[in-house]
Amino acid sequence: MVTHWTLGCDAAEPRRIAAFWQQALGYVTEPGFDGPDVASIIDPDGRGPAISFLRVPEAKTAKNRMHIDVRPAGEPPWDPAERERLIRAKVADLLTLGATVVREDRYDGDFGHVVMLDPEGNEFCVA
């Protein structure tokens, strides 16, 4: 049996960062968890984990030890050209939401993924 779980995240502005990830992942606001110091988003289909954001006083100071990988091409097997097209389209969408590109990684010369930062500077990959 699968155990349900929530990814808990520290945030300077919980509502702002929740709104970013809500748009990035196609999630919706979790009822009852939307206040000045907390925000939570959920998968509307109930498959993915909830993600909650809690206001903390300290700023981010180091690289994330855990991060989200956004996978617009879904599960393998992939057509490499279509996978790259879907990733680049998602990166373009995320840029309009306030994300920034850090770098593009390749493996043996082939396109791999794009490393980005969310609006609060948290690393994530579009793969």
Image (cartoon, rainbow, N blue to C red):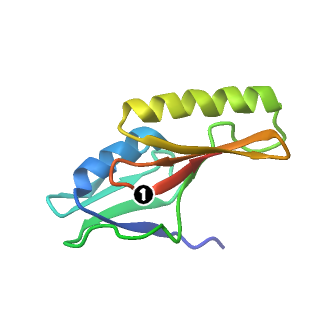
Give the structural element (helix, strand or loop) at label 1: loop
Q: Nearer the viewer, residue 62 or 43?
A: 62
Relative placement, left or right, of 93 versus 13 is right
Q: Residue 70, percent across and down?
A: 57, 46
Instruction: Count the marks.
Output: 1
- The quadrant of the picture occupied by the C terminus is top right
- Residue 56 visible in the picture: yes
Q: Residues within 10 Å of mark 1 (few under 14, many from 20)?
A: some
**Vertical order, 10 against 29 (above or below):** below
Type of amino acid at the residue the image marks with label 1: Asn
Q: In terms of image quadrants, where is residue 20?
A: top left
In the rendered image, residue 12, in percent from the top left (x then y), is placed at 23, 61
Indicate the quadrant where residue 27 lies: top left
State left or right for residue 123 relative to residue 2.
left
Residue occupying image coordinates x 41% and y 41%? 99
- x, y percent for residue 38: 23, 63
Residue position marked by numbered label 1 in the rendering:
122
**x and y percent of residue 88 in the render?**
61, 30
Q: Is residue 91 above or below residue 62?
A: above
Name the side, left or right, on which 53 lies relative to 118.
left
In front: 28, or 76? Answer: 76
Which residue shows up at 69% across the image and 36% down it?
73
Quarter that holds the N terminus: bottom right
Can residue 26 be seen? no
Q: Residue at x 48, y 67 (%)?
A: 64
